[in-house]
């Protein structure tokens, strides 16, 4: 058993723990049970044939007198890269488009309204190498690139909102790069984009070798299926990032990611779920799967020998709800599609119940935070 | 099996899951294993005789060249009330002093440097009743009350910092009440106090019936054993509350709490742990234990019949570390003392590794937060 092969927490618990105690364990670990969602047979059959995991869950809300239920379905896609990382750039992109196309088709069978792909989904997560070539060739225009056109086709075909996190080349500003989520409306129009607000300098990655902190703030996108936002990868470690998306009205915050390893995996079930609780909204955490090997060796700033891969992307994509509950995670090792039906009415119901925003005292924090960043800030420390 | 009797997640996992898979499950659920701390036999014997659980863990840091390790020990105490809630007020207080005294004595045997009691530890958590009498009689002066004097005796006797969360009566300001943590230095002097910043209006509790939002900001206390702060109970749901204690330099943030029930229990392992991760510090989450029954029936705003108790305080106190690891929780049903040895050097090491503060962009958030609280704030929503 190793972190490369262990398939899932949830399945292991179910294998060994007797039913009565399992129910208590699941309540404590996952919260109120998210119920299974019946998915059409054609979808489960297609998922089997195409070799990816398909899971469905639903989160219910109470019936209200004045608002009908607002049930929508999200699809979270996690996948391995398709071709070796030294295959021609265009071939790699085309192969990933093809793989995603066959998963999105199943999402459509399952009635998914909003689909989100993993961070930088058209490429290997090669930023560990610090090489500029050929990786910057994967960058595309957010508005007019081939990947955005591909997503527009999917959107129109399936009446689906598509969130497409890519490496963006910004030709209107000197051709620089950004880590960007493009949001395509179900009409097929590009609704807008939001850039990664926090850029890691940790372990194998200083991604600011390639792109800087995003300058698009905390945009929320009004879609036909609710107000959504995209907090890319490392931004999940920053509670303020989630908060500002929420204060701008996001009902669902997606967190497309690419993360590996021993240190981040115990944090993975915590952060997006904490954000759902703290902000009375749904969060969707998506991580890629598999091990990516690079032709040229690289070092990791950890004193160890140069190597060709930096660890196992552990998948484990999940949806967390404002009531503290969550779905089990997708596999740690396989491609997968997680379909979740969310009654968005739950957000306001939980907000009315727990009232974290009403009790949030944001004026006080705006002032304290402003003070804390001043050059002459003196921490409030009481000494004897 | 019910939420009243299920003893602990950790023990159930250990009972059923084979070793190899258990290691992976623990890694994902608890993070890097916190090692067992050897405690003296006299302490385990005394804990047995006095009928409380005693557990010890340690969190190590890497060896540095310029700083020696900074290992200190914290003690988290969770306990049931001792006498029935309709016993005379003074008897209840004295009985709780006695119970805590015998647990603190064991903490001293274990070399604890900083001990923290649960929220409002000198009384039943009676704020569900909305009765003012006799509960307001439990309030005391933070500086000169009998409980503070009691803590000062303990501090001097054991050279221990004592965090004593009480119901405070503020005679210098009209005799009003506060929910306050008193911090007593190991010298026996009162180092200061910090009041609960966020007051719940949820379920059985609108605690603002008794006391309002704290006006002491985010004080950090410089003790002989490190810089500490106290985030009382409901403040754990507010990521900004943790953040501001951390920006003021807290190395350990204690979260003395009183929480029950189906809805909050799945949130319990998430919030304090997320705070440890997000703020590169240690957090100590403490919850009381048991079921408290009140003579007069009360309702809970949930349409259900009046009742005499509002649920099971599920204990489960734990320590979380900045690297995402945590101790197992204490029992859900028994009194307990959790001793944890923390090498405080770990905070800066993890901060240097993950750099959430360096990448935090607090200027941007200070501005966005200031804008978000204006009357004419327009959320940043992109429409088609």
Image (cartoon, coloured by chain):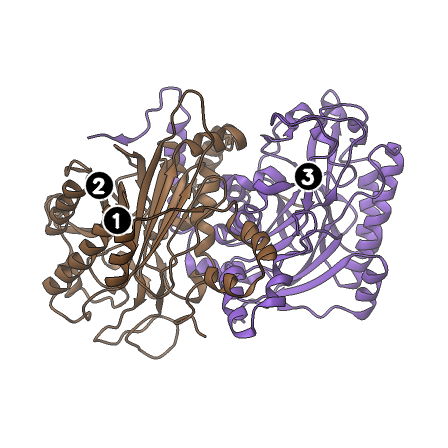
Chain colours: A brown, B purple
Q: Nearer the viewer, mark 3 or mark 1?
A: 1
> Dot 1 lies on which element?
helix
Q: Residue furthest front?
A: A41
Res A307 label: none
Q: Nearer the viewer, residue A325 or B303?
A: B303
| Quadrant in the picture for residue A381 | top right
Q: Crowding at label 3, few (<14), some or many (≥20) Cα neighbours within 10 Å?
A: some
Residue behind mark 2: A160
Q: Crowding at label 1, few (<14), some or many (≥20) Cα neighbours within 10 Å?
A: many
| Quadrant in the picture for residue A157 | top left
**What x and y, as percent, mark residue B235?**
58, 38
Q: Is residue A144 visible?
A: yes
Residue behind mark 3: B311
| A276 w.r.t. A53: above or below | above
Q: Is residue B335 left or right of residue A247?
A: right
Q: Nearer the viewer, mark 2 or mark 1?
A: 1
Cα separation, mark 2 vs mark 1, equals 10 Å
**What x and y, as percent, mark residue B174?**
73, 20
Cβ atoms under marks 2 and 1 closer than 8 Å: yes
| Quadrant in the picture for residue B138 | top right
Cα separation, mark 3 vs mark 1, equals 42 Å
Q: Is residue B342 visible?
A: no
| B135 w.r.t. B91: above or below | above
Q: Determine the chain carrying the residue at label 3.
A: B
Q: Determine the chain carrying the residue at label 2.
A: A
> Dot 2 lies on which element?
loop
Asked if badges 2 and 1 are on one and the same chain, I answer yes
């Amino acid at each position: 058993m190793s972190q490369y092969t262990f398939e899932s927490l949830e399945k292991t618990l179910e294998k060994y723990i007797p039913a009565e105690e399992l129910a208590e364990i699941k309540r404590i670990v996952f919260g109120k049970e998210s119920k299974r969602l019946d998915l059409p047979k054609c979808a489960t059959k297609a998922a089997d044939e195409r070799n990816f995991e398909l899971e469905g869950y639903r989160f219910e809300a109470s019936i209200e007198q004045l608002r009908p239920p607002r049930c929508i379905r999200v699809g979270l896609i996690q996948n391995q890269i398709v071709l070796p990382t030294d295959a021609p750039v265009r071939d790699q992109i085309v192969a990933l488009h093809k793989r995603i196309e066959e998963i999105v088709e199943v999402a459509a069978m399952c009635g998914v309204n909003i689909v989100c792909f993993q961070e930088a989904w058209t490429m290997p997560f090669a930023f560990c190498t610090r090489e500029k070539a050929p990786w910057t060739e994967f960058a595309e225009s957010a508005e007019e690139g081939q990947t955005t056109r591909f997503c527009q086709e999917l959107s129109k075909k399936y009446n689906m909102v598509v969130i497409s996190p890519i490496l963006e080349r910004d030709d209107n500003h000197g051709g620089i790069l950004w880590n960007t989520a493009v949001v395509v409306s179900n009409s097929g129009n590009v609704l807008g984009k939001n850039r990664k607000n926090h850029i890691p300098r940790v372990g194998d990655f200083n991604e600011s070798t390639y792109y800087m902190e995003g300058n698009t703030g905390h945009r929320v996108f009004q879609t036909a299926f609710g107000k959504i936002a995209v907090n890319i990868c490392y931004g999940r470690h920053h509670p303020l990032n989630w908060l500002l998306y929420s204060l701008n009205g996001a009902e669902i915050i997606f967190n497309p990611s690419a993360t590996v390893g021993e240190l981040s995996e115990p944090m993975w079930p915590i952060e997006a779920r904490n954000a759902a609780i703290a902000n009375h909204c749904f969060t969707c955490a998506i991580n890629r799967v598999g091990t990516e090997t690079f032709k040229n060796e690289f070092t990791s700033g950890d004193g160890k020998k140069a190597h060709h891969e930096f660890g196992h992307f552990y998948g484990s994509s999940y949806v967390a709800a404002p009531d503290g509950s969550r779905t089990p995670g997708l596999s740690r090792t396989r491609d997968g599609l997680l379909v979740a039906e969310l009654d968005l009415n739950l957000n306001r119901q939980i907000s009315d119940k727990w009232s974290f925003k009403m009790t949030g005292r944001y004026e006080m924090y705006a002032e304290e935070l402003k003070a804390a960043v001043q050059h002459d800030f003196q921490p409030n420390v009481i000494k004897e």
